[in-house]
Image (cartoon, rainbow, N blue to C red):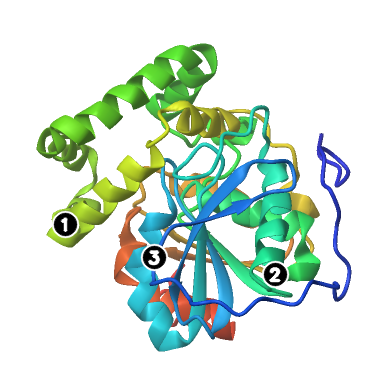
Amino acid sequence: MNGRMAGTFPHKPKGRMARAPRQASVQPASGTAQVLRLSDGRQLGYAEYGDRDGAPLLFFHGTPGSRRVARCADQAARRRGIRLIAPDRPGFGLSDLQPGRTLGAWPADIVELADAVGLERFAVAGVSGGGAYAAACAWRIEDRLRHVGIISGMGPIDEPALAAVLSRRYRAGFALMRRLPAALRGALGLGRLGLRCAPGCVLAGLAASLPEVDRAIFARPEVRTLLRDDALEALRQGPRGAAQELLLFSRPWDFSLAEIRMPVRLWHGAADAQVPVAIARRVAAAIPDCRASFIPGAGHLWILDHVDEILAALEQDQPVESLLMT
């Protein structure tokens, strides 16, 4: 279903909302894990980074991923005066699995989180797999959003037009996920075990699969540590959450990008091997008001070298001249 009434959504806020007075409390240290009990009883995990008094930006991690990856933006967010809030999606990190969830269900969790931490309006940004969830928020809760950013983001892959431009290996991988979900969970479980018991071997294998531009970034010790910690936290409950999300990406989405009515910023590396640039170009073409930048020679990990510029562009809604090369 592509209509805006598809799925369940407890409420769609309009204008200012009445809230209970906030209680004074001691702010937890940057990156400290926090949990919120949602209205349906599920637990949602999240962490805050950056400037606690700054302009709010909700950051959506990749797949598999967790709130921990946002620590790469902590210092830049402090410099820019941005309050960075990074939630775990269902089945990742500290967030309970949500059986039968859809991409379009995510904005309901974000509204509850925003209300709980006292946000009226805020920006959202998603990286890699998180890009789909930033798009879902732009589609469903545009009246709560100030800016939307999609960075190296995933898009629908079931369109026939993509078959001609995506590699056979890429298409076959997602087709295999759909047909053998148990094998997908098994592979993710083995990856989790390898990261715990033989991280050097797993990381070396991952590095070998990356294009040269990403391999150079991945070779930095702080990047390897960040991505290993992020993946381990993502899979702390096991592989079901990651498998569920990858299956969501492989099937028709439950909302239409063409129905997004607010401006969206998109950045994508032209040499991205994890999410081929052809997918990003289709996303940019489908969203009516999308300002897209395709960076020549950049891979999937380029954001780790440009966090400061992206935060500035999102918050100030100004172009990043060094990145606006199409």
Earlier sequence position, callout 3 versus callout 1 = 3
Mark 3–mark 2 Cα distance, whole angstroms, equals: 30 Å
Where residue 274 is drawn, which disc sits there?
none
Q: Secondary structure at mark 1?
A: helix
- Residue at x 37%, y 73% (from the top left corner): 74
Residue marked by disc 2: 263
Residue type at the position of mark 2: Pro
Residue type at the position of mark 1: Ala
Residue marked by disc 1: 216
On the image, the x and y values in percent for residue 134 come to 61, 56
- Residue at x 63%, y 69% (from the top left corner): 117
On the image, the x and y values in percent for residue 41 come to 69, 41
Residue marked by disc 3: 31
On the image, the x and y values in percent for residue 191 come to 28, 29
Residue type at the position of mark 3: Gly
The reply to whether callout 2 and callout 1 are in contact (CB within 8 Å) is: no
Residue density around tag 3, few if under 14, some if 14–19, many if 20 or more, within 10 Å: many
Is 128 displayed left or right of 143 in the figure?
left
On the image, the x and y values in percent for residue 181 come to 49, 16
